[in-house]
Amino acid sequence: MSKGRIAAVLVAFTCLLALPASASAMKFAAPTGSPITGVSPYVSTVVSADFNNDGRDDLASSTSTNTSGIAIRLAQSDGTWSAATSVDSSHGAYSVAAGDFNNDNRVDLVVYRTQGEGTRAFFGNGDGTFGSEVAINAPWNGSNSLGSWNALTTGDLNNDGNDDIVFPLSNGDFAVSLSNGSGGFSTANASYVTDAPSALSDKFSAAGIGDFNDDGHADIALGTAPTNLSDPTKVAVFVMLGDGAGNFTQAATHGFQISQPEGYEGKINSLTVGSFNGDGADDIAVATDPTGFINSPGKGTVQIFLGSSSTTLAKTLDVFQSDNRPGAVIARDFDNDNWTDLAYLERTDPNGPPDELISILRGNGEGSFQASPSTTFQVSSATVSSTDLVSGDFNNDGAWDFAVGYGNSGTIRLMRNQIDPTKNRDSIDFGDVVLNSGEKQQGVVIGNAGGPTATVGQVTITGTDASAFTLPPTTCAGQPIAAAFGSCLQNVKFTPTDHRSYSAILHVTFNNSAEVLD
């Protein structure tokens, strides 16, 4: 009798944290070309969208320190980025946000300028360039009126197909400007939110648009950052219910108070909207920290609120405590399992040298999330703090990537969503085989626990006794393996020629990654 054995050992060249195949890990890594340098003297905010309709998301960033306007960087097919071009180059900008304000399937920009110079819209040409400015009439305009640089929000508020603009403000106010679809916008008059903190230094620091009561109309969620934390009821999410015509009234429950675990008190830094449990109503997640500034010491939280078909929405569902100060939170399906996940940016030590981390809470489709060490990835160790976190598909592989803006360094760091090939066994043991009894066949299941689809490249057999093992006519080569659910059975045939032990290696490569299965 002869014994045959073919080894299968996972070798991970680019992963941040090597895991067993059964752990269903996620992988993010800095791609070639990161960080993007020379973006601007100071990165205030970053937005991601496909500005030239090539299937790859691009980046726009604002700078508040001089008159360099908005820097546009276009993602290229080879993974590089175009040289920066400028929009509104004669003005400084606190904020930039993207939307389609005239329903032409081209991405437009709204810019909140510095020095009290107002708000302007720039309509996209669909090729990465933008037309001349359009003024948005906002009587409250001024350098301190917007509650937070990251809070400018866009979405269709009146069901006409054109995106509109939400301005979260100071003094417990917010404002809405509706697009008419032909280049004009309604006046953005401020409205007070009942029970919201209303001191001059108080503000709405975050906003999101969604249908929180499942009535088919867009609503607005506003997160607070009050100056005085002695009254914890002022740290809350206020929901304004829409009527489908651009008008808003407060939900029956005026505000959803943020949970304040001892030692984790804080203001709302960021707010995101997504469907966490698939019930038809959009849900809310917020990130909090003690001061509202990511450079300060202290602990923070990520908290979950579920929407409801009633006007009384669900209060806090889950509170995730973080010792590393969450600064921004995003809702996306990062592992392509069809359930919404949450990603948040955190900073470990403001006294330096700090680590900037991205942590992911993986959703289960029922409104709950799971945190584990396998879903925390280091972005950088730097003395310059981050100012914004966005997500986009920068290489058109169907998976969400990250971009992080860094203030005084004028750079944007990228984290690419990686494939994570897996196998259901470490080796194929054919056992004892009788000579001249014909070939014996066994297989290994190749899977993918990562975000992008993994396309199998070559499948080969190498090693001392490779000639004793063969592949069937149909192999996994060229097969796409979708994340979470996809797999391919790769069979191997063994035909011994004499009485001894045999050994070889099954080698599998992937077209869109340096990952290898051996």
Image: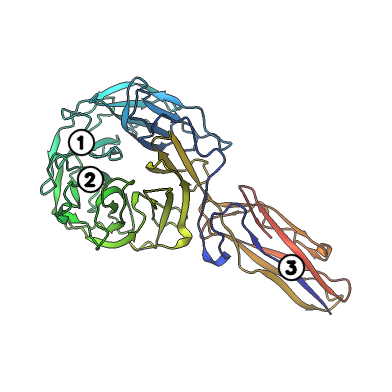
Residue 176 — which label? 1
* Rendered position, 99 above or below 476: above
Q: Are marks 2 and 1 in contact (CB under 8 Å)?
A: yes
Inspect the image, locate mark 2, and give the three-letter code of the amino acid beneath it: Ile
Q: Residue furthest left?
A: 194
Name which residue lies at 43% across and 28% down: 126
**Callout 3 crowding tier (Cα within 10 Å): few <14, some 14–19, many ≥20:** many
Q: Nearer the viewer, residue 475 or 400?
A: 400
Query: Would residue 376 be visible to someone looking at this image?
Result: yes
Q: Earlier in the sequence, mark 2 or mark 1?
A: 1
Picture quadrant where residue 104 is located: top left
Question: Is label 3 in a helix, a strand or a loop?
Answer: strand
Question: Is label 2 in a helix, a strand or a loop?
Answer: strand
Q: Quadrant of the C terminus?
A: bottom right
Spot occupied by residue 61 in the image (x, y as percentages of width and height) = 39, 33
Query: What residue is disc 3 on?
Result: 6
Inspect the image, locate mark 3, and give the three-letter code of the amino acid beneath it: Ile
Q: Nearer the viewer, residue 506 or 277?
A: 506
Residue 518 — which label? none
| Left or right, 26 with reference to 509 | left
Spot occupied by residue 352 in the image (x, y as percentages of width and height) = 41, 48
Question: Is label 1 in a helix, a strand or a loop?
Answer: strand
Query: What residue is disc 2 on?
Result: 220
Q: Nearer the viewer, residue 514 or 358?
A: 358
Picture quadrant where residue 312 is located: bottom left
